[in-house]
Image (cartoon, rainbow, N blue to C red):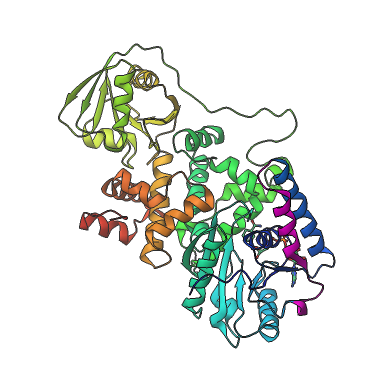
Amino acid sequence: MPALNLSVPVAVIGAGAMGAGIAQVAAQAGHPVKLYDNRPGAAAQAIDGIDRQLGRVVEKGKLCAEARAAIVARLQPAESIDALADSGLVIEAIVENLEVKRGLLRQLEALCGKDCILASNTSSLSITSLAAGLEHPGRVVGMHFFNPAPLMALVEIVSGLATDPSLAECLYETANAWGKQPVHTKSTPGFIVNRVARPFYAESLRLLQEGAADCATLDALMRDAGGFRMGAFELTDLIGHDVNYAVTCSVFDAYYGDFRFQPSLIQKELVDAGRLGRKTGRGFYDYAEGAERPQPVELASTAIVDTCVVEGSLGVAEALVQRLADAGVTIVRRDGNGLLRVGDAVLALSDGRLASQRAGEDGLANLVLLDLALDYAKATRLGVSWAAHTSDVARDQAVALLQRAGLNVSPLADIPGLAVLRTVAMLANEGADAVLQGVGTAADIDLAMRAGVNYPQGPLAWADAIGLPAVLRTLDNLQAAYGEERYRPSLLLRRRVAEGRNFHD
Ligand code: NAI
């Protein structure tokens, strides 16, 4: 079914942050839009707000004054819900409460024509349950925008059990026509983004809880090595710990306590203490005026290293070798299993085992493990850990070599899978399970994570780049190290490795 014609009247219910943004998007696309809120005056106020905001866009020269006036003219506050009777699409963005939303949908079903599509912007409620009990549950579709709706490209088009596929397709095409990047998904807890993103927070929280490093160091690794815009601590401080913790709890409960989604006690402590992040002036970081922002821990070495030996291929980290060569380090190549030797030290990319365990099992004296980087040619920081028996001299030589490549080197305790590697492996694992369970295609899951939460790469494409056997090995080793369900590899990952295929083949 094609996109809705621009002459089709759209109604948005709820004039809060999301409803106002969605109304703006629909009006910008060219639809006549009615905005309704049960708080008297709220809809008119929201339209004034949109007008003011568009005024700033005009001042920046990104919109002409006529276009601003035309958009605002298409937006009308509705005095009562009855004014929405002629709508072809109603998008509700009211309070996140199942019973209240259900009541509203029942009211709309009685009010609007039988062809009117009823969409919900819910971020956590089941579209299947929202539609249950309606006379025509097939016309209820999830249309999940991200905040702020005018700026964020992603829209998850969510189908419940009864949703008419042609209406989901129509909203997909409509979102596309509105300049958004839609993805199809099934009504399962967290849909795509709020499910697949859970490990991003969970792994950093666990690393902190287990003393792997402090917040500033872990955040810096996620940014400077992982290529994420923010680390988990600064991001959850921005989102608000009450909100982020509630989403985690709701996904955890909805999956019947699957330990993959286990909430974090240290985040609960913050919530209990009222340290909700930026909005209360304190979360993991202190936002009080004059408070000093902690800096990431870095290792410095004055050892002089001119030569290193590369045994076999370093795989995803191979670009590091070129970087060292460009910096004037002499590279000696030998056959082998992906090791980098400098002085007494042996460097290797983590495979999910503890450094001390791997040093013993593989007979590697003076082992230093390297964390994952999104792009080893461009990263500005890398995490390292080392085995208990690694000498200070060897560790210093390893650090000196990485410094020659221009990298800041941040230490992590001897923890399996280090920081970026275990996070990316877990994101890809969750994405793989979502594909396996038909929640979305690999392409849509990657697109959702890039467009919805600005990941530098889709987790499944990232796993393909690392090599699926290496990702599987990392998860198997993490599972063995912790003895926990949490790290169990997705069947789809194991299957793809057995088939010799990638997620995107
Ligand atoms: P909000 O609290 O800013 O706005 C909700 C608005 O709905 C309020 O103006 C309220 O007066 C109005 N309202 C409440 N009950 C109503 C009813 N029965 N009839 C008419 N109006 C009613 O909330 P926000 O943040 O805009 O969220 C709205 C919806 O969007 C929720 O379902 C939320 O889960 C979802 N959402 C929120 C996101 C966010 O980042 N805030 C992101 C994506 C989805």
Percent x, y of residue 433: 38, 61
Ligand 1 is in which quadrant of the figure? Answer: bottom right
In the rendering, at what x and y percent does residue 309 appear? 22, 22
Q: Quadrant of residue 389?
A: top left
Q: Quadrant of residue 369?
A: top left
**Residue located 55% across and 57% down the image:** 179
- Asked if residue 417 lies left or right of residue 361, the reply is right
Q: Residue furthest front?
A: 66
Left or right: 495 in relation to 69: left
At horizontal 59% and vertical 69% (from top left) the residue drawn is 125
The answer to whether residue 82 is magenta is: yes
**Magenta span:** 61-83
Residue in the image at 45% along x and 22% along y: 299
- Whether residue 251 can be seen here: no
Frontmost residue, 220 versus 446: 446
Q: Above or below — where is 478 with respect to 320?
A: below
Please state if 313 lies on the left or on the right of 34 as rendered. Answer: left
Is residue 151 a member of the stretch shown in magenta? no
**Residue at left offset 65%, top offset 58%:** 28
- Give whichever of 373, 44 is nearer the camera: 44
Pinpoint residue 412: horizontal percent, then vertical percent.
Answer: 44, 32
Q: How many marks?
A: 0
**Residue reaching furthest bottom?**
135
